[in-house]
Each structure stands twice: as C-alpha cells, then as structure tokens.
Image (cartoon, rainbow, N blue to C red):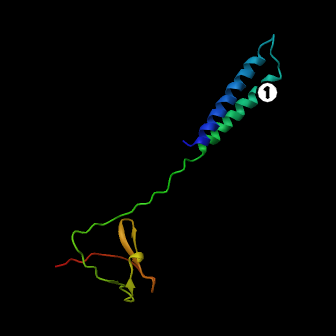
Amino acid sequence: MNAGKIVAIIAAVLLILFGALMVLGATNTETGSSGWLPIGFVFIAVGLVVIFFAARQPAKTPDTNITMNVELPGNVKMDTIKCKSCGGTLAPENIQLVAGAPVVTCPFCHTTYQLTEEPKW
C-alpha cells in the first residue's frame, strides 16, 4: 500500500467517526442541535466515498527487467551468424528473447525468424 492510500483511508475513518458523533450529538435533546444531523450524514457519506476511491486505486507494480547471462565453459569460438533470407551479417543486438525462444530480426531485409541449434554430429 502506498502512502497516499493510507492517508486517504485514515482521513476517511476520521470523517466517518466525526460524522457518527455529530449524528449522535444531534439526538441529544439538551445540548444537541438538529443542524448537526445533515452535517453528520455528509461527513459519513464523504468518508465512504473516499474509502471507495482509495480502494479502487490500483497498486503500482514496478517494471521487471530480466537479464539472462550464459556462461560458457572454456574458450568458445564464435561463428558469424548470417540471415537465412538475404545473407546479411547479424549482430547480437538483432537477437531478442521472445517467449523463451531466441528470435532474430534482420536489419537489412527485416525478416524475423527463430534461431534453432543444429546438432554438431
């Protein structure tokens, strides 16, 4: 819960409390005033509206960035990756992880396809 929502709920509870006290005070025949009754109901109504809108405010979820690092054992020789359509050289910036699968987009012909690992035998 964020601080604004907590402050709104505390203010609403205080409004409802003071509204209830004014309604109860209006029923006292010796010291009460009939003018307190509508004011008490207004306080209660405003408090309920504030609680309603504070509860409807969605909680903000922080943006989550996932970084995958692959550690390869020993020295690994990298081959250049070429586009299957136009033969252009692809850079690591052209490879993205989409739904758990590596997908490449060629900057030259704008072809998009999934990378597959060929068996080495």
Instruction: Reply above or below: 53 against 89.
Output: above
Q: Residue at x 40, y 60 (%)?
A: 66
Along the viewing direction, whichever of 57 and 6 lies nearer the viewer: 6
Pinpoint residue 72: horizontal percent, then vertical percent: 25, 69
Question: Most extreme residue toward the front, as rendered?
Answer: 75
Quadrant of the rendered image containing residue 65: bottom left
Instruction: Reply above or below: 107 against 27.
Output: below
Question: Most extreme residue toward the bottom, as rendered?
Answer: 86
120 to the left or right of 51: left
- Amino acid type, label 1: Pro
Quadrant of the rendered image containing residue 99: bottom left
**Quadrant in the picture for the N terminus:** top right
Quadrant of the rendered image containing residue 42: top right
Q: Residue at x 51, y 51 (%)?
A: 61
62 to the left or right of 54: left
Pinpoint residue 80: horizontal percent, then vertical percent: 32, 83
Q: Residue at x 38, y 74 (%)?
A: 103
Numbered disc total: 1
Instruction: Reply above or below: 68 against 53.
Output: below
Residue that badge 1 annotates: 38
Question: Most extreme residue toward the top, as rendered?
Answer: 30
User: Secondary structure beneath disc 1?
Assistant: helix
**Quadrant in the picture for the C terminus:** bottom left
Pinpoint residue 22: horizontal percent, then vertical percent: 75, 22
Pinpoint residue 120: horizontal percent, then vertical percent: 19, 78
Q: Residue at x 59, y 38 (%)?
A: 6
- Label 1 Cα neighbours within 10 Å, binned few <14 / some 14-19 / many ≥20: some
81 to the left or right of 60: left
